[in-house]
């Protein structure tokens, strides 16, 4: 299915932090090449998330689910933080239904990646394309996870260990993308011991 997405917005991701966005400024000479992403026809028009971006997208979705659940639990009385079934179902649905306007695609040295909250920025300065087809694709992927795994299982994984959602969705046997298997979660984290939990 081909769609005509809204015109994307381009921002620079400055040295103030991975989540700091500002209007594009001239890019100074650095040790890497950063330019406004040049999208292929698939990246521009397909209703689905391109395979090479599914790992980053999965991590973004897992991060948002974790953040929404943590925020909801923080409002509960101490000692009874667990959410009821109707509560966690609403929270996970809301995590998918958000605007996703803080995420975009960057291209560094010819390689495209997602950038935004919960995703490690590879460079201090790069150009990020926001809007366009990306929010709808993130929403669709998030809804697909709710349909495939169910809110109950996702919440159980979160309660087992909050950061387990990324391992469950992106690195387990039924992970969202084969590409995630080649990308360690974070420095000092042994993802393989976590993956074994889902085999």
Image (tube, rainbow, N blue to C red):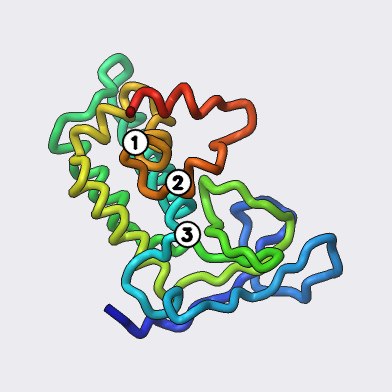
Q: Which residue is mark 3?
A: 53
Horizontal side, residue 83 vs residue 176: left or right: left
Residue at 48% across / 49% down in the picture? Answer: 179
Give how far across and how far down residue 70 sits, in percent: 37, 33
Q: Please give the name of the residue rendered at 32% of the width and 82% of the height, measured from the top-left corner.
A: 3
Q: Mark 1 or mark 3, which has the lower sequence index?
A: 3
Q: Quadrant of the N terminus?
A: bottom left
User: Which disc number belongs to residue 40?
Assistant: none
Tell me the SS state at disc 2. Answer: helix
Q: What residue appears at the point 26 percent right and 48 percent down from the top-left corner?
A: 145
Left or right relative to 88: residue 27? right
Q: From this viewpoint, which residue is outermost toward the left?
A: 86
Cα gap from disc 1 to disc 3, whole angstroms: 19 Å
Number of marks present in the image shown:
3
Q: Which residue is identified by label 2?
A: 59
Give the distance between the C-alpha atoms of the residues marked 1 and 2, in whole angstroms.
Answer: 16 Å
């Amino acid at each position: 299915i081909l769609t005509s997405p809204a015109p994307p917005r381009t921002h620079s991701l400055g040295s103030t932090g991975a989540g700091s966005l500002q209007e594009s400024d001239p890019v100074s000479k650095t040790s890497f090449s950063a330019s406004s992403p040049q999208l292929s026809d698939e990246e521009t028009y397909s209703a689905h998330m391109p395979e090479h971006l599914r790992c980053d997208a999965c991590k973004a979705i897992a991060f948002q689910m974790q953040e929404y659940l943590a925020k909801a639990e923080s409002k509960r009385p101490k000692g009874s933080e667990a959410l009821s079934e109707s509560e966690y179902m609403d929270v996970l649905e809301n995590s998918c239904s958000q605007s996703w306007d803080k995420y975009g695609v960057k291209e560094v040295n010819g390689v495209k990646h997602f950038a935004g909250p919960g995703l490690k920025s590879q460079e201090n300065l790069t150009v990020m394309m926001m809007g366009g087809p990306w929010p709808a694709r993130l929403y669709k992927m998030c809804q697909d996870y709710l349909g495939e795994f169910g809110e109950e299982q996702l919440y159980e994984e979160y309660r087992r260990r909050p950061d387990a959602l990324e391992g469950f969705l992106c690195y387990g046997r039924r992970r969202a993308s084969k590409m995630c298997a080649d990308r360690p979660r974070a420095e000092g984290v042994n993802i393989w011991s976590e993956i074994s939990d889902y085999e």
